[in-house]
Image: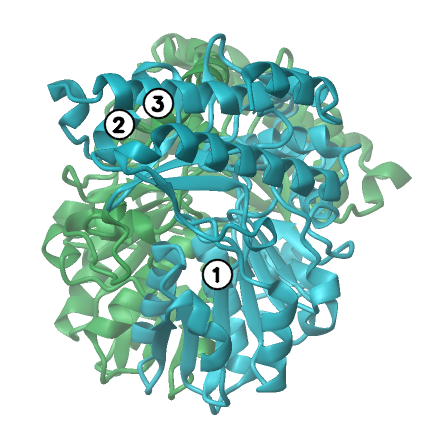
Chain colours: A cyan, B green
């Protein structure tokens, strides 16, 4: 594979026009869209209008006049279309952690005699913290049981009140089989919550086809909603009117403007809302989702895996001699859309990459991580990133004090 | 009192220069800053920079380079200065409802043998819903006991695990005595949570002097942080390292970037954080708080009460014959900074006021509500608002189908 071959692949890329819909900094190869997606064009204008006109001029009337109050549901419907969910089954708002808490609480109420929250060691730690916080809050024998990712299927038994599984591992990119695990959980009478943080916007997801009970997801990664953009939450339609989120506020009330002192949860997905949402961030997300209007998620998956395959091949071919080896499965059907490379001195190597305008991140203990975002990552980007990595390793240019010194936040 | 007297009061107003720091729509008398504060100047520019430069160009590095990760704490310190709290005792983020949940959970853990959450019927319903949601989640005999506002003092006994009190009633503006009630709660061994939604930015508050245990508050009302701006949360310093929020995520971990599967809560106020915060809304809030740099909260309180007194006097003098009567105490020391008027056909009257560019809101069953925001409401505004109200009632111009028809959200 030569760089020219990559350029040829870019010419036949079905998403070649989509790249122009994003503000990609000049000269930067941005492979961290799995952490913070780039700015879609049109978002800045939409946010400016929300600030100056809607807030600044229309003020309180914007809750009705500019659709603020219902935007979490409208945004939810846009996301639903990208994750294989029906209308009115997804709502945007709060954070993944908060939404996960609501769903865990609802799931535990559905299985009052069971005490185990099952998860795996490949889950994002914050999800495990949510479960630990809820466990400690409830006491009463609740426990979090975590097993290795490959052992989840065997660990689902009739003690499991709920399985809490992240589809794509934030480090290795290993992907769980949503349909199979959901069926296994149901066979043991356990509902399952899917965290789609590293899959929504990167892969075709079929929540409906998999019969998933619940899901949460992130919008600031592959959905490009902006830093800390509101998260989302899915509840299967037949469960919505039974779900008791535990964390309840006026946006989840059947008639919030009656100001009734008694809680009466709204029917449908609305009840999963809690407090007033941050509308500037919500408006940015709403606008960001417009880039997906004509995008087919199967094509996205196909390109995601083509980019990952190419990067693994190039990186291992040129950098294998320096101890570089891709983490996670080789079979693309079992992967998400990022690649982590085990790499000696990985922290410093990533700092050197960033200094060379190839942006990825580092995940302890030894992984350098690269996200491939099908709508704006090109095959030439992948070739160039592998090339810069190889040169850094060949010249040992990572071996400088400014790259070796760890920063608090990365 | 004539209009000229009001103009004279405006000339000697210590905040007359502050009004120019806000974008007040031309010709509008905006008396709904207790629901959504107006846009401070400079916020639009700050948000635009956060979108285009920080997100658009610096991307993931902005979490460090532009202080995103620590902004909830920096914003918290700005708010702390306005509510009588020490540094590092306030953090911004999430919503009031979510923050209240964390504090209720923490308070209940502090008093494991007690089962009663005490509140009052003047509390904002969403706060009561949070308590009801938590009660139902925990089961185990927990209960929410609500009494009339004037009966709270007498209802605090040794069954009370936590008192959850909103300082200023969102309808009547009745103000609880924070210092006295806190002392009463402590005498019975109960911690107390103060909701400052209708007081922060409107009144001098002394959380430290009152020895309050916990507080939450809103930033989109009198603090002008923007629609749905992140809320805030206070924990008294000596309680911080013991507080177990129940709702926990990676931003509350002692070392979030270690990605440790085991939850270890950070020391201090940091542990009360949960998930990744919406940075566009957070940046707007951060910029909005800059208008308070040289503001003394005692002066704010003084003007707040002068505006309220004037409005009650004018409204009752001119509209009393139409059945208009102010709700809440007459003694300003027992009030917040808004006035609700009992008013026959109040809903339609408020619609007619809005059509005449006097913006307030309606609260069932019969109250028209006006918020007075000392930094940008003038005495002439108050006079004009009362004048428009009187004319609407005198001419019965509220009696039109378009004003009588109720909208879903108001």
Residue at 16%, 22% (x, y): give it: A399
Residue at 31%, 81% (x, y): give it: A139
Please tell me whether mark 1 sits on a helix, a strand or a loop: helix
Instruction: Name the residue that disc number 1 marks.
Output: A100
Horizontal side of residue A393 vs A6, given as left or right: left
Crowd band around label 3 with a 10 angstrom C-alpha radius: few (<14), some (14–19), many (20+): many
Foreground pick, B45 / B130: B45
Please tell me whether mark 3 sits on a helix, a strand or a loop: helix
Instruction: Name the residue that disc number 3 marks.
Output: A390
Crowd band around label 2 with a 10 angstrom C-alpha radius: few (<14), some (14–19), many (20+): many
Viewer-nearest of labels 1 and 3?
3
**The C terminus of chain A appears in which quarter of the rendering?**
top left
Q: Which numbered disc flags the more N-terminal residue, 1 or 3?
A: 1
**The N terminus of chain A appears in which quarter of the rendering?**
top right
Q: Quadrant of residue A88?
A: bottom right
Q: Which numbered disc flags the more N-terminal residue, 2 or 3?
A: 2
Q: Is residue B306 above or below residue A222?
A: above
Residue B310 x, y percent position in the rendering: 46, 29
Crowd band around label 1 with a 10 angstrom C-alpha radius: few (<14), some (14–19), many (20+): many
Q: Chain of mark 2?
A: A
Foreground pick, B264 / A83: A83
Horizontal side of residue A383 vs B394, given as left or right: left
Instruction: Name the residue that disc number 2 marks.
Output: A349
């Amino acid at each position: 594979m030569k760089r020219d071959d990559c350029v040829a692949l870019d010419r036949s890329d079905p998403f070649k026009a989509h790249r122009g819909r994003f503000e990609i900094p000049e000269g930067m190869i941005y492979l961290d869209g799995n952490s913070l997606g780039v700015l879609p064009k049109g978002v800045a204008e939409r946010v400016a209008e929300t600030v100056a006109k809607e807030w600044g001029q229309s003020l309180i009337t914007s809750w009705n006049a500019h659709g603020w109050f219902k935007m979490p549901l409208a945004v939810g419907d846009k996301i639903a279309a990208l994750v294989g969910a029906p209308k009115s089954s997804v709502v945007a708002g709060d954070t993944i952690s908060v939404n996960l808490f609501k769903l865990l609480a609802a799931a535990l109420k559905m299985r009052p005699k069971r005490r185990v929250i099952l998860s795996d060691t490949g889950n994002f730690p914050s999800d495990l913290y949510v479960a630990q916080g809820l466990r400690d809050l409830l006491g009463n024998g609740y426990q979090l049981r975590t097993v290795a990712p490959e052992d989840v299927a065997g660990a689902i038994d009739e003690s499991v009140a709920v399985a809490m599984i992240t589809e794509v591992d934030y480090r290795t990119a290993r992907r769980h089989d949503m349909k199979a695990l959901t069926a296994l959980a149901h066979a043991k009478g356990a509902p399952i919550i899917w965290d789609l943080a590293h899959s929504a916007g990167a892969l075709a997801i079929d929540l409906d086809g998999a019969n998933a009970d619940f899901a949460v997801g992130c919008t600031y990664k592959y959905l490009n909603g902006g830093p800390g953009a509101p998260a989302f939450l899915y509840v299967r339609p037949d469960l919505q009117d039974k779900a008791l989120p535990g964390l309840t506020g006026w946006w989840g009330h059947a008639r919030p403007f009656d100001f009734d002192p008694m809680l009466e949860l709204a029917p449908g997905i609305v009840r999963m809302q809690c407090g007033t949402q941050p509308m500037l961030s919500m408006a940015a997300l709403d606008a960001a989702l417009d880039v997906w209007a004509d995008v087919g998620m199967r094509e996205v998956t196909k390109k995601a895996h083509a980019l990952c395959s190419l990067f693994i091949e190039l990186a291992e071919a040129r950098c294998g001699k320096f101890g570089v080896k891709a983490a996670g499965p080789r079979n693309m059907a079992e992967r998400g859309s990022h690649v982590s490379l085990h790499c000696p001195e990985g922290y410093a190597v990533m700092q050197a990459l960033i200094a060379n305008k190839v942006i990825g991140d580092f995940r302890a203990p030894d992984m350098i991580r690269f996200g491939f975002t099908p709508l704006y990552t090109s095959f030439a980007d992948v070739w160039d990133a592998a090339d810069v990595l190889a040169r850094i390793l060949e010249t040992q240019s990572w071996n400088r004090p400014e790259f070796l010194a760890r920063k608090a936040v990365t």
